[in-house]
Amino acid sequence: MAKEAMNVEYIEAARHSLSHILAQAVCELFDGVQLGIGPAIDDGFYYDFDLKHRITEEDFAAIETKMTEILKTDVAFVKRVVENPLEFFANMPYKLELVKELVEAGEKITIYESGDFVDLCAGPHVENMRELRNWGFKISSIAGAYWRGSSDNAMLQRVYVHAFASRKELKEYHAFLEEAKKRDHRMLGNQLDLFFFDETAPGMAYWMPKGLKIYNKLLQFSRDVHEAKGYQEVVGPQLNHSSLWVTSGHWQHYDGNMFKVQIDENNVYAIKPMNCPNAMIMFKKKNRSYRELPLRFSELSMLHRDESSGAMHGLMRVQAFRQDDAHIFCTQEQIAGEMNGIMDIMDYIYNIFGLKYKAFLSTRPETFLGEIETWNEAEAVLKDVLASRFGEDGYTLNEGDGAFYGPKIDIKVYDAIGREWQLCTIQLDYQLASNFELEYTDSDGKRKTPVVVHRAVFGSVDRFIGVITEHFAARFPFWLSPVQIGIVPVHNQHEEYAKKIQDQLAQYGFRVSLDTSDGTMGNKIKGFRNELVPYIIILGDKEVADGKISLRVRTGVQVNDIELDKFIDACLDMEDSYKIELAEEF
RNA sequence: GCUGGUAUAGCUCAGUAGGUAGAGCGCUCCCUUGGUAAGGGAGAGGCUCCCGAGUUCGACUCUCGGUACCAGCACCA
């Protein structure tokens, strides 16, 4: 490959070439190494190994040194077709498994040789190791990884390496990771006293007063938005008898993820992991007419899911959480309208938070329930909606990735270090309504089964708080800040005036904190700044005399001689229109 | 669940080649009456150093088991 083309393909080829160097280094340093695979990834590459020796961080330096030595040999990467691949790879069980499949598929088997090292590989590679001399690389971690991504297989040792076209870029990447660490919502949540976890309730957050303020603000926001869009909020039982879960299919398909409560020998209840079955029961409570459709039930109830121990991750993956859930009962003809309605809400909400997102459409899997025509029709509708909003190529199609009961649209956003999190999900369901024998009377007097749409925009409210904590680096917009305004009197003789200002602000419902403790004003300002309070009002002789206020904005801007009314107007504006930026002029 | 790692004061962390433990921040009190990110001093706080067993005269330190958390894999109908 041409070196001058430092494009995505070249970078991938270079990273992949480096993965061969890594594999060669590991083979030279340790005995009995069996090779798995070693692809390029977003920030470098990895290679999977099977060997007796447990690779630890202490080995990293030696491996890196060996890699550098190998690179200095200036050896070319040479591609060759293997004539008798099954013999060639006879002593390499993992490679052999891959080769067998390739041979069966009628593929030619190619290898790349770089000096003494040979690896099964389709390429492409750089031409010569010389090209990699200036690359910056560093082993980042070692972790277990299942062969071919299946937990039925052996676990190999995966060595992750960060690799960039220059040492400078590598350094910049490490700086980025450092920055990202500072945004970690688990650290910020603890530091700012928003939430925490206790060993006695893994994956279930304790929400402290300041964190709960954010939480409740989001719930209120969600309620306001959805009520305006014709949703009606409901609440179903937290604990439901197993018979309900048998009807819904969860007992059969979601068994391992439900917390159960044994009442007596014959009765087991499960804490709900989802709201849907309760929504079905609420629909079924009375005879429904087509005139009621689309019927939109929203629900913000607590959900519990028994997750496997390694899955938990701060607020991003928890065992107890709330979805801003809703179930829409509609006709097949109403699907497009409902989809657009949901996407409107999603777009409106994500814009308020300044979140960039990506859409994914998952279509009919191999095993599915229902009529194939219904599926095709539904998928066509979803594609239309997505194409009209994002363009034909503006979304990702995951063929065959849908649930067995219907296709779905997922929306993903990214956290501080680029980890991907699913927030919004919209799922069409052709199964649940018939499981529960839901019907409505259509205009022709016939009884018909409604289509069910499951949807959430925040996804999990808890996860959403995790994402926006990192997104804003805990510098929340004015309307979401637990404490919006801090007041620091220069001297305690100014406290009376400060109290007056506080009262006036509180009249508008703003969350104001007046610091009348013994500390110095420098310390008080420090306190509010560490708390990331949007505005600090400082009041001394000058302000008392003029009847005004002076302000320290979280951005660092200092503004003096402000009339309180002007400041209040600005605050009301930020509050009512959910502004992200803080006003700096009054 | 799997592989590897971590667990010491409210927080961030240090520490003991095995002899019951420290710093900074925070907290309390005193002095300081101060104009935009750390004024000075004193003090309290661990007595199960995550939990349980074992080795030992003696375990926070070593061994084994458990739990939680961290990185990754698997999982996320």
Image (cartoon, grey):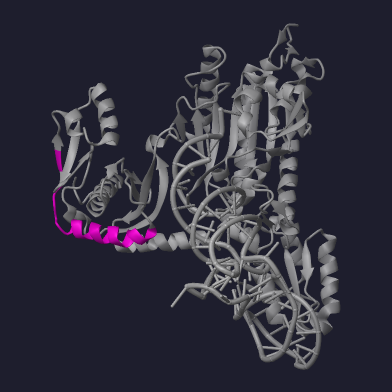
Q: Is residue A460 left or right of residue A411?
A: right
Where in the figure is residue A573, as x and y percent of width and height? 72, 56
Position of the N terminus of chain A, as image quadrant, is top left
Is residue A579 shown to the viewer in this render?
yes
Seen in the picture, residue A502 relative to A90 is either above or below; the reply is below
Q: Nearer the viewer, residue A109 or A267?
A: A267
Please state the extent of the stretch shown in magenta in the rendering.
Answer: A57-79
Q: Is residue A4 magenta?
A: no
Where in the figure is residue A221, as x and y percent of width and height? 72, 46
Q: Residue at x 75, y 6 (%)?
A: A445
Q: Is residue A66 magenta?
A: yes
The total number of labels drawn is 0
Q: Residue at x 74, y 26 (%)?
A: A279
Q: Nearer the viewer, residue B3 or A518?
A: B3
Seen in the picture, residue A542 relative to A253 is either above or below; the reply is below
Where in the figure is residue A219, as x and y percent of width and height? 73, 45
Q: Quadrant of residue A347?
A: top right
Q: Nearer the viewer, residue A90 or A377?
A: A90
Seen in the picture, residue A6 relative to A447 is either above or below; the reply is below
Is residue A582 shown to the viewer in this render?
no
Q: Is residue A371 left or right of residue B27?
A: left
Position of the C terminus of chain A, as image quadrant, is bottom right
Q: Nearer the viewer, residue A243 or A559?
A: A243
Q: Main secondary structure of the magenta part?
A: helix
Q: Residue at x 82, y 59 (%)?
A: A508
Where in the figure is residue A507, as x and y percent of width and height? 85, 61
